[in-house]
Amino acid sequence: MFRLLGAFVGFFIFGFLGIFLGYFVGSFIDRFNAYGSGGMNPFNATRRQSVFLETTFILMGKLAKSDGRVSETEVSHVELFMQKLGMTHEHRLKAIALFKQGASANYDIHPQINQFLAVCGASSNLKQMLLVYLIIMGLSDGQLNSVEEALLREIAGHLGYHQVAFDQLIDMVKNQMHFAGGQTSSPSALEDAYRALGVSKDSTDQQVKRAYRKLMSQYHPDKLMGQGVPEEMVAMATEQAQEVQTAYDLIKKNRDQNR
C-alpha cells in the first residue's frame, strides 16, 4: 500500500524520478508494518535465522542441564521439537550438537546471548519467541523447578525483560499450553483462557480483543520469518497461535452467552 502511495506522491513532487524514490521509501514502510523493526533489513535474514536457531538449542541444552542432569523427558521434548520442525538429517545433527554444547559443564551462555542481541535484538518478537520456546522446554516435565526458573529469569533479564513482564509471559505460556489440541473441557478452562491472553474476566471486550490480536500478530508466520525465525521453527509458533485462538473463542462464546 505505502509503496504505491509513495510512488504517486514521488511522481507528484519530483516527476518520473520521484516514482522510484517514493516506491523505495514506501517499500521500507510496508516492510516495517509487516515485520517490525527486526525485519527491516532483508539481506540479514539468513544471519538472523542462523543465530536464532543456534541460540535456541544452546539455551535448551543449558536449561535441561541446569538442575544437574538432562532428564529423559527433556530429551524426548527436544526430539519431538525437532520432529515438529521437520528438520533434515543434517540440521538435526547440528541441533543436537548445539544442545550438547549448551549442556556441557561450565558452559558460559553469555557470549551466545550477546551475539543473539547483536543480530536479533532489534526485534521484540524474536526475543519473546526465544523465551517462549525455552519456557515450553522447561515445562516439558510438567513444571519449572527453582533452578530452571532462575536460569530463565537470568536469560530474560539479559533480553531486557523486567520481572513483572516475565512473570506474565510464563503465566500466559503455561495457560496457552492448556489449550493444546483445542481442549476446552477442564473446569478451569475459562479462567485459563483469560490468563492465556494476559487479561482477566474484568477486562473489557476491547481489551480482550486487543490482547488477542497482539498475540496473533506475534505468532504470525510471515512476520516471524520476515524477522528471522527459521521457517522450520514457525510450526511451533503456529501451534501457539492455535492455542491462543482456542482460548479467545472460548472467552468470546462465554461472553456472547451471558449478554
Image (spheres, helix red, strand yellow):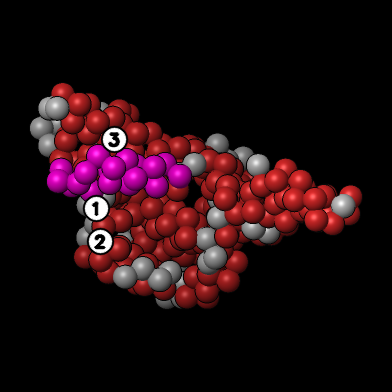
Q: Indicate the position of residue 42 as horizontal and vertical percent values.
A: 69, 54
Residue at 60%, 54% (x, y): give it. 32
- Residue type at mark 2: give it: Asp
Q: What secondary structure is found at the residue carrying circle 1?
A: helix
Magenta region, mostly helix, strand or loop?
helix
* In front of the other: 163 or 61: 163
Left or right: 187 in relation to 90:
left
The residue identified by callout 3 is 248
Residue at 72%, 56% (x, y): give it. 25
- Residues drawn in magenta: 199-217
- Examine the structure image and report whether residue 44 is included in the region drawn in magenta: no
Q: Indicate the position of residue 92 as horizontal and vertical percent values.
A: 57, 46
Q: What secondary structure is found at the residue carrying circle 3?
A: helix
Specify the label residue 167 is tagged with: 2
Which quadrant of the view contains residue 157?
bottom left
Q: CA distance from mark 3 to mark 2?
A: 21 Å
Specify the label residue 171 is tagged with: 1
Of the two numbered discs 1 and 3 on the same chain, state the one appearing first in sequence: 1
Q: CA distance from mark 1 to mark 3?
A: 16 Å
Q: Is residue 27 visible?
A: no
Left or right: 53 in relation to 247:
right
- Residue type at mark 1: give it: Asp
Q: Indicate the position of residue 58 as horizontal and vertical percent values.
A: 48, 61
Residue at 77%, 47% (x, y): give it. 7
* In front of the other: 47 or 248: 248
